[in-house]
Every structure is written in C-alpha cells, then in structure tokens.
Amino acid sequence: MQKTMKHILVIGIFCLLICNSAIAAEQSTQDLAKASQNPVANLISLPFQNNTNFGIGPDDETPNILNIQPVWPVSLNEKWNLITRTILPVVSQPGVLTGGQGRVNGLGDTTFTGFFSPKDSGDTTWGVGPVFLIPTATDDALGSDKWGAGVSLVVLRMPGKWVIGSLFSNVWSFAGSGDQDINSFTWQYFINYNLDNGWYLTSAPIITANWEASSGEKWTVPFGGGFGKLFRIGKQPINGTAQAYYNVEKPTNGPDWQLRLQLQFLFPK
C-alpha cells in the first residue's frame, strides 16, 4: 500500500511538473508574440515583409516590394531606450510606374526611424523620434532621388490578449535632385488579438497621404486583416503573418488590393 502511494505521489509530481512546464512555455510564447507586435519593444528582430499590389493601371499590373526591416534597440540609460528601425525595400515596378521603361527591379529608398521610448511607461507604451528618407534607389524609377526628414510617433496598449495602437509619421524632402518634392504622411493602426499556441488575429493597414498630389489623388486607404503565428524552427522563434487589404480609397493608378506576407526572425535577450 505504501509503495502504491509512493508511486501515485511520484506520478502526481511528474504530471505537475509537466503541466507547469507547458503553462510556462505557453506563457512565454504569448509574451513573445505580443512583444513581436509592439513596434518599440526591447527586442532585436529581422522582419522580411513582402507586399504584392494588384490592379495597377489599365492593364492590372503587379508591383512587388520586399521590405527588409531590421529592428535594433539600444539602451541609453536606466530610463530610456532608442529603438532603431530601418526599412530597405527591394522593388519590382511594372512599366506603368516606370515611365515606359518596362519592368524595373532593384533597391528603393531607405527609411530610418529612431524611437525614443521610456523603459517604464505604465499601461500606455509610446515612442517618438526622427525619421529619415535616404535616396538609395538603384534606378530613378524606384525612388525619389530626394533626402527627407520628419517625425514619427507610436502609441499602444496591451490589455489582456490585445495589442492595440497607432503609428504616425510625416516626411518632408529638403535636398536632392529629384523633380518632385516630398510631403508624405503615414498612419498605421494595428489591432491584434492573441489566441492560444502562438496564433493571433491582426489588422494593420498602412494609410498614406501624398500632400503634394492633386485633389482626389492624395489618399490610399486600405481595409482588411489576416492572421499570424509565432513558431520555432529549432530554437529560433519566428513570427509569420498573412494579410490582405482592399483599398477603399486610392489614386488613379493605385492598386486595388494588397497581399502582405511576413516572416519576422526574433532574437530575445
């Protein structure tokens, strides 16, 4: 009888350890998933975001932009982080957007943003800082040939399973030989609801306005969403998402809709 009780006790402790380990792993997965959805998280990451736009021009042509977006946080002192975010686009533009050159492939202009974010901001996380446009395009059809600068702001909250926030920026050109001045506004709101096992639902449309364009040609306003999952290959955590957006407002030669696929490699400390 005593041996049986010992066996039951050992099995019970073993099951408890397994359950606690599984709960801890699930909690770790959920926490990392939420961190990957936070633009100013203290988390090194390397996202590859591919955007395919459909329905450009009268022939329904298809441009493609692969954004390589390394995020590198820097601890400035006990109270502040600097979250650096670089966007290097690899672009494939069809003839309707290249002035008759046919399809052009290469690098576009680089955008660099530095968010100053407090390490302890309470329930509302925020960051603010400069944004720079760097003319790195390998062809005139892929960039503006302009230097630009502006300001960017991100604000978010993470109640329970939600990650909800907005990112705003505006860039003005100040130098360069390009023909068109730049005065460009970007607003990305993001709404994420985290499920079990690293799955989540997401909507993160990128709304833009070209203030230099004529009336009726300024805004691109997408609506849609998708899903994502945090998974691992070996020990490497990866955040994958698939999203689709329909443009309810767009310029004359703007796309009808967009397919966005992303793999984000995460490097938690």
Image (tube, rainbow, N blue to C red):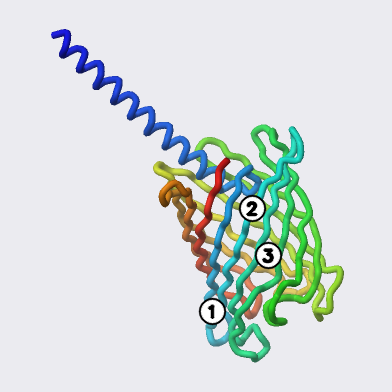
Left or right position of 141 against 15: right
Which residue is drawn at the image coordinates 67% and 73% (left, top)?
Answer: 108
- Mark in front: 1 vs 3: 1
Residue 71 got which mark?
2
Kindly identify the amino acid type of the residue bearing the numbered disc 2: Val
Which residue is drawn at the image coordinates 43% and 49% (left, top)?
Answer: 231
First in sequence: mark 2 vs mark 1: 1
Measure how far apart labels 2 and 1 are at the Cα level. Answer: 28 Å
Q: Quadrant of the N terminus?
A: top left
Q: Are marks 1 and 3 in contact (CB under 8 Å)?
A: no
Element assignment for label 1: loop
Furthest residue in direction right, as rendered? 174
On screen, residue 205 above or below 122: below
Is disc 2 surrounded by few (<14), some (14 to 19) or many (20+) residues within 10 Å?
A: many
Kindly identify the amino acid type of the residue bearing the numbered disc 1: Thr
Element assignment for label 2: strand
Q: Residue 263 location in percent, x, y?
A: 50, 58
First in sequence: mark 1 vs mark 3: 1
Kindly identify the amino acid type of the residue bearing the numbered disc 3: Thr
Instruction: Give the residue number, with chain letter if any, for mark 3.
Output: 208
On screen, residue 108 above or below 163: below
- Mark in front: 2 vs 1: 2
Q: Are marks 2 and 1 in contact (CB under 8 Å)?
A: no
